[in-house]
Image: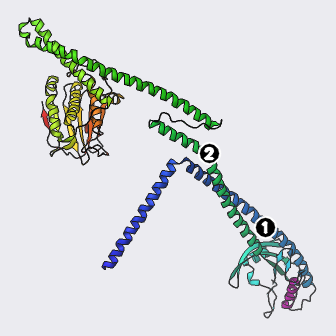
Amino acid sequence: MTPAASGQGRWLVRTARGLVAAGRRRSSAFSELWRRSLQLRVVVSTLALGSAVIFVLGMVLQNQITERLLATKEEAAIAQTRIAVQIAERELGGTSPFDPIRDRLNSALNKLTSSSPDQSGAGSAGAFEPVLVNDAPYIAPSDVRAAGPYESIPQSLRDFLLNTSNRTVSQIYTVDRNGERVTYLIVGVTVATANTAVQLYMLFPLAAEQRTIGVVQSTLVVGGLVLLLLLAGITNLVTRQVVLPVRRAARAAERFADGELGERMVVAGEDDVARLAESYNEMAASIERQIRQLEDFGQLQRRFTSDVSHELRTPLTTVRMAADVLHASRAQFPAGLARSTELLVDELDRFESLLGDLLEISRLDAGVEELIAEHADLRAIARRAVESVRVIARNAGSEIVLDLPEGDAIAEVESRRVERILRNLLANAIDHGEGKPVELKMVLDENAVAVTVRDHGVGLRTGEADLVFNRFWRADPSRNRHTGGTGLGLAISLEDARLHGGGLDAWGEPGEGACFRLTLPRNQGVQYEDSPLPLLPLDARPMTQPAPLPISVPEEVYP
């Protein structure tokens, strides 16, 4: 193959691919428009049904008109043929049997041709061509059997006329005349003569009827198209009157959902659409009042939490100083009093932790928290989080299994917040892991990094995965806890993840444990599409689904 031919072939392939891609885009655009536009579906469906009705009606009308035309033509042709039979019988009956058949048939044919008023072969059935056929067995070799265009008569019609008791038969037949196709209505009769057996065939051209049928067909087609266009316009107009208010209601609902609580529909008239607008406006007003009340209540609650947290700081500091003094001198106290000082310090630690969480929540609610992000290795952050919960993991009898990437896991994050998220997730898994191993896995791609914390404890019941991030919510208040949590850890973790532009998800099944997934963008301001790790753990998937290839290093176990 020459280079020119090869280049032309590649051009053809690219052109074909481009056409296929363009066709797919157009098909996809129409499919999207079909799904989204009620007006288009109604108009197209109405046109489809209307086309079917018009087609059936047109076929019925055309058949009725055609049959009526042919029936009228046949009746007139038979009547004209009966007159011609009388003329033929008169002409053939008055001749001598010894006259040549040629002369008798030609004489009768001339008389038939000149029998019409205008002498052109036209009568009540229109123009015609007569044919006389002699079927007598005694015909001289030099004589003829027929007069007129005998070759235009089909043999089947002649045989039927000879073998039937009916004296009149008819058939529509198409013949070639001078290179053109001509359709005739042929009426055949038997002429009763005393001297010989003669058949008379009258050929009536159907050109006028064909032109009439053609005009009828054209009229039906044009009328059907015009009717379809009118039907499309009427359907579009009627549908538009219904769809436009619905679209306005949808736009109003979308703006209301986007936070424009003062958005209302225009009420015009007293019809069903107007009543719909009134009902929508009443509903929107009720929702707006409730939202305003909730906002006021939430703001009051946040202000109360913030004020209480700040007000408790000063007395807590004083009590902490006194408790530290007592705790430092506990060796001088009796055993019971020394134990009381230790409990006092422990409870002050828990109270100080709760107070710190409340202050953090208050700052997050107020929107004053700022992200101080820098590029850091998330593997080191994960190891620090594990070290911070190693003591409570040892007390609970759980081991922490780390599955980290082999290379650096660099991302633009605030290390303090990410470490707090992982520490809260690990502490929560240890609390609910019932002494079973807790697994921390990290995977990253070009745009995001994901960390999952998996336990094999009691798990979550149906619907609880959406509640675990609520403030002060606990799956089982009576469960023994090892961290003394405040119930705000997961709520703070979710806010920290959102502050990074990421997300925090939960999964759990009773008896299967729970899995929490943290997903963060590797660079601030760059959004990611999918998380590098699935939320559903691999060991919880059906056995028929293949597991993805591992992309981590050998596990690190923290007893």
**Image coordinates for residue 305, horizontal then vertical, percent:** 31, 21
Q: Quick one: quadrant of the C terminus?
A: top left
Q: Residue at x 22, y 40 (%)?
A: 373
Pointer 2: residues within 10 angstroms few (<14), some, or many (20+)?
Answer: few
Secondary element type, mark 2: helix
**Image coordinates for residue 538, horizontal then vertical, percent:** 26, 39
Q: Considering depth in this image, is 304 or 98 the residue closer to the camera?
A: 304
Q: Considering depth in this image, is 453 or 166 the residue closer to the camera?
A: 453
Calculate the distance from the C-alpha at mark 1 to the C-alpha at mark 2: 46 Å
Could you tell me the amino acid type at mark 2?
Gln
Q: Is residue 108 magenta?
A: yes
Q: Which residue, given by chain and number where applicable, does mark 2 sit on?
A: 241
Is residue 206 visible from the viewing direction of this image?
Answer: no
Circle on res. 69: 1
Q: Quick one: quadrant of the N terminus?
A: bottom left
Q: Which span of residues is magenta-colored?
A: 97-113
Question: Residue extending furthest left?
Answer: 332
Which of the two discs, 1 and 2, sits closer to the camera? 2
Left or right: 355, with 299 as reference point: left
Could you tell me the amino acid type at mark 1?
Leu
Report the number of discs.
Answer: 2
Q: Earlier in the sequence, mark 1 or mark 2?
A: 1
Query: Does the magenta stretch mainly form a helix, a strand or a loop?
Result: helix
Left or right: 35, with 2 as reference point: right
